[in-house]
């Protein structure tokens, strides 16, 4: 079975042109079939603030009203996605930029209101892995942004870490999938004050303990939670890493059950 590399990029890398170029260069050099999935939350936050829109986050997840969704679509599916696709094309990767609505690939429903109303946020119901595989088979490198749809004409903001996990799971029967959450550090840090010291491995039990004792950054919670879900869904390998150890995974944090 062939290996498929799925890289989710986020954090400061999206906003830093030099670092993003380094990441895209490293991604271009991956010889295995590959998919790139990106966020853009910080860029959306900046634009929202410039427009006078209030930004609301809970545990690293964005509250999305109608105005915020418009900004998210403009930034994720427009500016960020197409800029990444253009840069990958310049490096020789035949990238194709996608939302979940394109090809009906990622179908979602609006998240039900429980204790928190997240607004126009999508909970993914289905990913058409075979359609993604056909794109790969004809030589495309899919580049997904963090937008899904409900098949009724409504776009939905969806956490990019979650999209990476469910896309990886949808392809686990066709490939040995390696899912890597890539950001500005080499792995999950013991302390934000010491960026050189990473945690080698995080199990599901350790993850829950870190949440309970408050030793984990809120923005890291969705990555680790979705990484654990990916392993349970048949993904062969999940890691949190940086640009420099994207291939080797030296000092990266491996996620395990």
Image: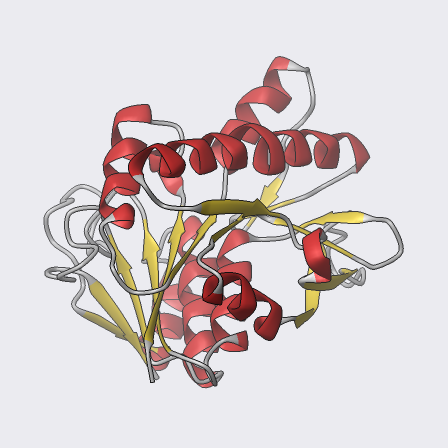
Q: Which residue is drawn at 67% across and 36% down?
A: 73
Q: Picture quarter containing residue 180? A: bottom left
x and y, in percent, of residue 106 in the image: 67, 62
Q: Which residue is drawn at 73% across and 55% down?
A: 116
Q: In this view, does 85 lie to the left or right of 191?
A: right
Q: Looking at the picture, does residue 236 appear above or below residue 160? A: below
Q: Nearer the viewer, residue 210 or 66?
A: 66
Q: Looking at the picture, does residue 205 appear above or below residue 77? A: below
The residue at the far right in this view is 152
Q: Residue at x 77, y 63 (%)?
A: 114
Q: Looking at the picture, does residue 151 appear above or below residue 126? A: above
Q: In this view, does 190 lie to the left or right of 234?
A: left
Q: Is residue 69 visible?
A: yes
x and y, in percent, of residue 111 in the image: 76, 60
x and y, in percent, of residue 164 in the image: 48, 61
Q: Nearer the viewer, residue 125 or 251?
A: 125
x and y, in percent, of residue 257 in the image: 35, 84
Q: Which image quadrant: the N terminus?
A: bottom left
Q: Is residue 119 visible?
A: no
């Amino acid at each position: 079975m062939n290996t498929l590399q799925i890289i989710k990029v986020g954090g400061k890398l999206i906003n830093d042109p030099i670092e993003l170029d380094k990441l895209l260069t490293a991604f271009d050099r991956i010889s295995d079939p590959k998919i790139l999935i990106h966020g853009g939350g910080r860029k959306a936050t900046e634009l929202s603030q410039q427009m006078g829109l209030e930004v609301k986050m809970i545990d690293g997840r964005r509250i999305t009203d109608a105005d915020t969704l418009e900004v998210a679509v403009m930034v994720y599916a427009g500016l960020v996605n197409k800029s990444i696709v253009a840069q990958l094309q310049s490096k020789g990767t035949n990238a194709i930029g996608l939302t979940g609505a394109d090809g009906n690939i990622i179908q979602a429903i609006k998240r039900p209101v429980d204790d928190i109303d997240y607004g126009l946020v999508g909970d993914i119901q289905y990913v058409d892995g075979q359609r993604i595989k056909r794109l790969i088979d004809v030589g495309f490198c899919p580049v997904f942004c963090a937008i899904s749809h409900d098949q009724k004409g409504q776009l939905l903001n969806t956490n990019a870490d979650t999209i990476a996990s469910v896309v990886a799971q949808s392809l686990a029967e066709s490939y040995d999938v390696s899912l890597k959450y890539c950001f500005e550090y080499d792995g999950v840090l013991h302390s934000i004050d010491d960026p050189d010291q990473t945690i080698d491995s995080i199990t599901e039990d350790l993850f829950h303990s870190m949440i309970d004792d408050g030793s984990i950054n809120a923005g890291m919670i969705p990555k680790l939670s979705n990484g654990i879900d990916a392993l349970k869904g048949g993904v062969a390998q999940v890691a949190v890493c940086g640009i420099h150890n994207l291939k080797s995974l030296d000092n990266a944090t491996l996620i395990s059950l």
